[in-house]
Image: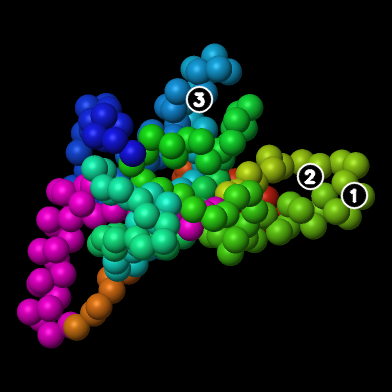
Amino acid sequence: MSVIHKKRLVDKFSEPTSLNELGHLLVRHLNNHKKWNKKRTTNNDKVAGLCWKLYSRKVGASHYAPIGKSTNFWNADRYPAWTGRLWLRMKSQGDFWVSDLFDDSCTYIGTGGGGDYDSPWTAVYEKWHTIHKQNNYNKKPDYPEPRLYSWSYTIWQEDWPLIQKNFEEEFVFHKLAGETKKSVKHVFHWQDPKLDKLDSEWLKNV
């Protein structure tokens, strides 16, 4: 990822100061990604949900690295990061790999792909596919298919200096309060509130 990609994001959405703000920025980025232009759609409401569970720790830059740094598969330098797993639920499907939407996000997905992966939407996903199987895959349930994806996920701390600054200040505060955590957990959970209600109603009635 380059300085140019970061500048484009910040110019378009403004620089986030917290991981929660970065999560909301990512939702807007995915909804408005240039990949959708091929479908010539004006619908900017394609993401149904985005969640992550991340931990602060140093990560080797084997496959991807902070802006301006180099990767090295055999002897990777380690940099502070927030790393863990990301879950994504989509309303729309394009003629491209969903993972392509992250190519210029200045965040990095790793192993994973389509499927539940113990997501926040396991209940509706398993119910939908159970009914589909009971119908011998000839008839889909009368409810939109939950399009779920998940990957290992990394955000380099130095790529987002305002977030890093606030994070470090909070870490020092907890340390002064006597909390000796080596790693700090962060959970982000965003879902279209309308869909959340629809999921609940559908699960009650099937």
Residue 154 place in picture, x, y as percent: 38, 55
The residue at 10%/71% (across/down) is 172
Question: Which image quadrant: the C terminus?
Answer: bottom right
Q: How is the image coloured?
A: rainbow
Of the 4 image quadrants, the one containing the N terminus is top left
> Marks 2 and 1: CB-CB under 8 Å?
yes
Q: Amino acid at mark 2?
A: Pro
Q: Which label belongs to residue 141? A: 2
In the rendered image of this protein, does residue 53 appear above or below residue 176?
Answer: above
Q: Residues within 10 Å of mark 2 (few under 14, many from 20)?
A: some
What are the residue bounds of the magenta stretch? 150-179
Q: Amino acid at mark 1?
A: Asn
**Secondary element type, mark 1:** loop
Q: CA distance from mark 3 to mark 1?
A: 34 Å
Is residue 188 visible in the rendered image? The answer is: no
The residue that label 1 is drawn on is: 135
The residue carrying mark 3 is 35
Which label lies toward us, 2 or 3? Answer: 3
Where is 120 relative to 105, above or below? Answer: below
Comparing marks 3 and 1, which lies closer to the viewer? 3
| Crowdedness near tag 3: few (<14), some (14–19) or many (≥20) residues, C-alpha within 10 Å | some
